Image (cartoon, rainbow, N blue to C red):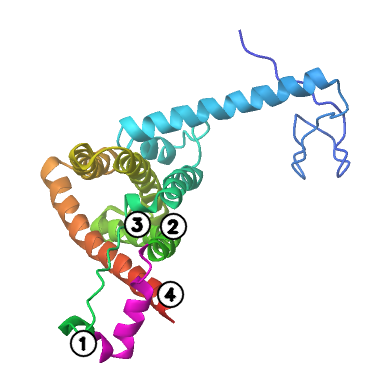
Amino acid sequence: MQRAEPEPAYSACLNCGEKLLGEFCWRCGQEAVDLRRPMRDLASDLLDNVLNLDSKLLRTIGSLLFRPGRLTREYLAGRRAPYVRPLKVYLLAALVCFGILAIWPQGVVRVVVKPSEPGSAASQRRESASEREQTYQKALADSQRFADAFTSNLPRAFFLLLPAFALLLELLYLRRGILYLDHLVFALHFHAFALLVMAVAILINTRMSPRVAVPIGVAAWLWIFVYLFLAMRAVYRDSWWKAGLRFAALLMLYGAAFGLAVYGLMRFTIYRLGS
C-alpha cells in the first residue's frame, strides 16, 4: 500500500505567498509546517529526524568501512538519499581522528631532544650554530609544545591533499573521460576511511603496550593500502593487472606528495615556534 503524502499545513506559502503544491514551497523552498503545535508533536518530529539521521549515518559508515568502493559507486550512480554526503563523511571522520589526536598527540608525534653536556663537542657546535639551527633548537626544546603545534596543523594539510589525490586519479584515468568531481568523491570517501582507521590505531597506540600496538598499527596501514586497491577496482572497474599498475603509480606519486606535505608542515611548525 502506497503511503499518502502529508498535506501541507497551509494553502499558501507564508514567506512568499505562492500557492503550495506540497510540503515545501516550489518558489522559495520554505517548509509548510506549523510550529505552533503541542510539545508532544514537536518532540515526535524531532525524534523522527534524529532516528533518520542515525540510520543514514550507520548505513554510510557500514558501507564505508566494510565494502570498499561501494559508497562511491552508489553516490555516482545517483543513489544518494540513503547516505550522508561525501564532504560531511570526511568532515566527521576528520573530527573524530584529529579530535583524538588533539587529546593524545603523543600517539603519533614523539619528539625527543637529548641535552648535551657543557663543554662537549655538541655543545660547542651549538654555540657556533647558524641562526637556522638555533631556530630548530628553540622550536624542539619543548617536545610537547612542538607535538601540539604540529598536530594542530595536520587537518589543514590533509584537507589540501584531497584535491591533489583527485588530480592524480584524473591523470591516471585520463582516457576514461571521468569527471574530476567524481575523482574527488572517491578521494573524500577513501580519506574518510583512512582517518577512521588511523583514529582507532591512535587509541590503541596510546592505551596498549608497544608489543600489542605496533603489530596492530602495521596491520592498520596495510589494510588502508589493501582497501584503496579494492576500492579502485570496485569504482573504476579495472582488470586486476590494470588496477595493480594504477595502484602502484598512485602510491608512488601520492606517497611523494604526502611526504612533501609532512616535511613542509614540520618546517612551517619549526619556523613558527622558533621565530
| Image depth: mark 4 or mark 2 in front | 4
The reply to whether the C-beta atoms of the residues labelled 4 and 3 are less than 8 Å apart is no
Q: Earlier in the sequence, mark 3 or mark 2?
A: 2
Q: Pointer 4: what residue? A: 273
Which mark sits nearer the N-terminus, 1 or 2?
1
Neighbor class of circle 1 (other Cα within 10 Å; few <14, some 14-19, many 20+) is few
Q: Residue at x 37, y 46 (%)?
A: 195
Check if residue 136 falls in the magenta segment. Answer: yes
Q: Secondary structure at mark 2?
A: helix
Q: Tell me the amino acid under the disc marked 1.
A: Arg
Q: Residue at x 20, y 39 (%)?
A: 219
Residue 155's label in the rendered image is 2
Q: Would residue 82 be seen by someone viewing this image from the given angle?
A: no
Q: Is residue 50 above or below residue 126?
A: above
Q: Quadrant of residue 151?
A: bottom left
Residue at the far front in the pictured view: 118
Identify residue type, mark 2.
Pro
Q: Earlier in the sequence, mark 4 or mark 3?
A: 3
Q: Residue 264 — which label?
A: none
State the image coordinates of residue 110 (x, y, percent, origin top left): 30, 58
Sequence-wise first label, 3 or 1: 1
What residue range appears in magenta? 125-143
Which label lies toward us, 3 or 1?
1
What secondary structure is marked by label 1? helix
Q: Quadrant of the C terminus?
A: bottom left
Secondary structure state at the residue bearing disc 3: helix
| Residue designated by label 1 | 125
